[in-house]
Amino acid sequence: MFHLPLRWAAPIIIVAGLSSVLSPAHAGPDKPKMTVYKSPSCGCCVAWVGHLRDAGYEVEVRNQLTMTPIKKQLGVPSSMWACHTAVIDGRIVEGHVPAEAVDRLLADKTGIYGIAVPGMPMGSPGMGDDENARFDVLTFKAQSDAESEVFQRFGK
């Protein structure tokens, strides 16, 4: 059996305690769990999930061979489609939406069904670093391509 010298015990306990307080899994205990549906081979989706986890979200990933049935079942309008779809607190988050916009969605009490960053714009979370990137997060209603509004703008 392996024993550590007693003088190492305090530093190990302190580091272990700090890592549990500072880890992303513990950063937002009041944030609801998110379920992300994505293709098993999509690297940008993996990067986006990492972005949300870094922001304190607990994320369950469900790999899907085809995303169309999920998007249709959840009522994501085809004009809003991106590579992955998430469900959080009964709302939909489509595509490379920044964690800041997800936080704002959860605080919003106006009944927004979902938000999206349609397509895969460069510079959005998970789509590389581009300090000149500009993109909008849009709201949508279930199954309605006609009604969307800018929820939040990102970029210069």
Image: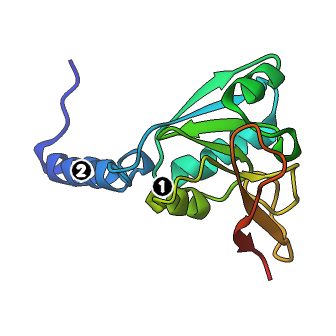
User: Does 12 appear above or below 98?
Assistant: above
Q: Residue at 71%, 33% (x, y): give it.
A: 75
Q: Amino acid at mark 1?
A: Leu
The residue where tag 1 is placed is 106
| Image location of residue 107, percent across then percent down | 45, 61
Q: Quadrant of the C terminus?
A: bottom right
**Quadrant housing residue 121:** bottom right
Q: Quadrant of the N terminus?
A: top left
Instruction: Pick out the residue farthest to the bottom.
Output: 156
Near mark 1 (Cα within 10 A), the count class, few <14, some 14-19 or many ≥20, is some
**Quadrant housing residue 99:** bottom right
| Image location of residue 9, percent across then percent down | 16, 46
Find numbered disc 2 in the image and state the secondary structure of the residue it sits on.
Answer: helix
The mark closer to the camera, 1 or 2, is 1
Q: Residue at 60%, 62% (x, y): give it.
A: 101
Disc 1, disc 2: CB below 8 Å? no
| Image location of residue 18, percent across then percent down | 28, 55
For residue 59, side relative to residue 96 (left or right): left
The residue where tag 2 is placed is 17
Find numbered disc 1 in the image and state the secondary structure of the residue it sits on.
Answer: helix
Rendered image coloring scheme = rainbow
